[in-house]
Image (tube, rainbow, N blue to C red):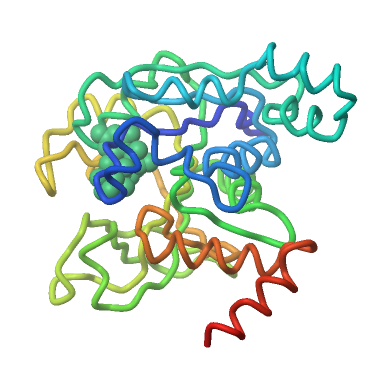
Amino acid sequence: MRMPRIRKVMFPVAGLGTRFLPATKAVPKEMLPIIDRPLIQYGADEAVGAGASALVFITNSSKQAISQHFSAAFELESRLAQDGKDDTLALVRGTLAEGISQAAVPQHQALGLGHAVLCGADAIGPEPFGVILPDDLIVNDGRGCLEQMVEVYEQTGASVIAVEEVPPEHTHRYGIVSTSPHSERVEKLEAIVEKPAPADAPSNLAVVGRYLLTPKIFELLAATGTGAGGEIQLTDAIAELLHHEPVYCYRFEGKRYDCGSKLGFVQATIELALADPELGSPVADLLKQLS
Ligand code: UTP
């Protein structure tokens, strides 16, 4: 059976970003740059690389910067054109590839990731869709994480969540899964629990910020009450989804940086700078001098 294509990717970016205050008082966390591209740009490029043609941003009222980033900037563009700065102009215009649409949906109160996803129900409609949390930056030499997951979705026709092993003492920061084997890199989800203490965790296999979900999740989210941390948790709705449909976990290829934490953000900045053709060598020299 041919699966409906994944056309839409949702970006829940309405969180308060408290770990980066005061930087995130007026600027959304997702607009913080790793070198010269904001986190949201890495996420958008990953979505487009996976075949998406519509990006849906779930935002709070202080996050117009994200929509602006993906829109035309007339004054800047005409100045760059006048000055003959064609390369820079291409960078400014290239934030959103031609033919890709963007829409912003408000989440008026930060009631949790599950609630944020539910806010996007009308914009997504009755079709499977992707979810990217841009503060989980996943870097890859080959295919992006979401593109890899689309392949698993095409094979299984079911929801797919990206997972990776984390240090056992970090389970309280993640949704944690227990699974049974399926195929290389793919496991069948058996149970999922949000932020368990290490002693209660069923494993150290953690959910990271990439999901491919069937639209059934919206119906289940609408009936999901508050869970861990007093928030409406996507994890709880996925646990319920398991009672209706199979769900698969995918051990993605690539390296994830938790850019929602200061250490992860700094690590991503250093490692991406070292990998940059222009910056790599001077940054390596700088690091040698410092060590
Ligand atoms: P986080 O747990 O990282 O929360 O949310 P946060 O508010 O962004 O950051 P801190 O912890 O206060 O520093 C995970 C993802 O879920 C989104 C966030 O924007 C982030 O992408 N989210 C969270 C929402 O969109 N709405 C919410 O109500 C909660």
In the rendered image, the vertical position of residue 182 relative to residue 156, given as above or below: below
Judged from the image, the quadrant occupied by ligand 1 is top left
Quadrant the N terminus occupies? top right
In the rendered image, the vertical position of residue 78 relative to residue 285, given as above or below: above
In the rendered image, the vertical position of residue 235 relative to residue 270, given as above or below: above
Identify which residue, 166 or 279, lies in the foreground.
279
Looking at the image, residue 159 sits to the left or right of residue 61; the answer is: right
Q: Residue 139: where, in percent of width, then height?
A: 61, 59
Residue depicted at 79% across the width and 23% down the height: 80
Whether residue 128 is visible to the viewer of this picture, yes or no, is yes
Residue depicted at 85% across the width and 29% down the height: 85
Whether residue 241 is visible to the viewer of this picture, yes or no, is no
Residue 141 quadrant: bottom right
Looking at the image, residue 91 sits to the left or right of residue 254; the answer is: right
Q: Residue 192: where, in percent of width, then height?
A: 27, 56
Residue 284 quadrant: bottom right
Identify which residue, 186 or 112, lies in the foreground.
112
Q: How many marks?
A: 0
Identify which residue, 266 or 264, lies in the foreground.
266
Residue depicted at 22% across the width and 57% down the height: 193
Residue 13 quadrant: top left
Q: Residue 156: where, in percent of width, then height?
A: 56, 48
Residue depicted at 74% across the width and 30% down the height: 94
Q: Residue 130: where, in percent of width, then height?
A: 51, 36
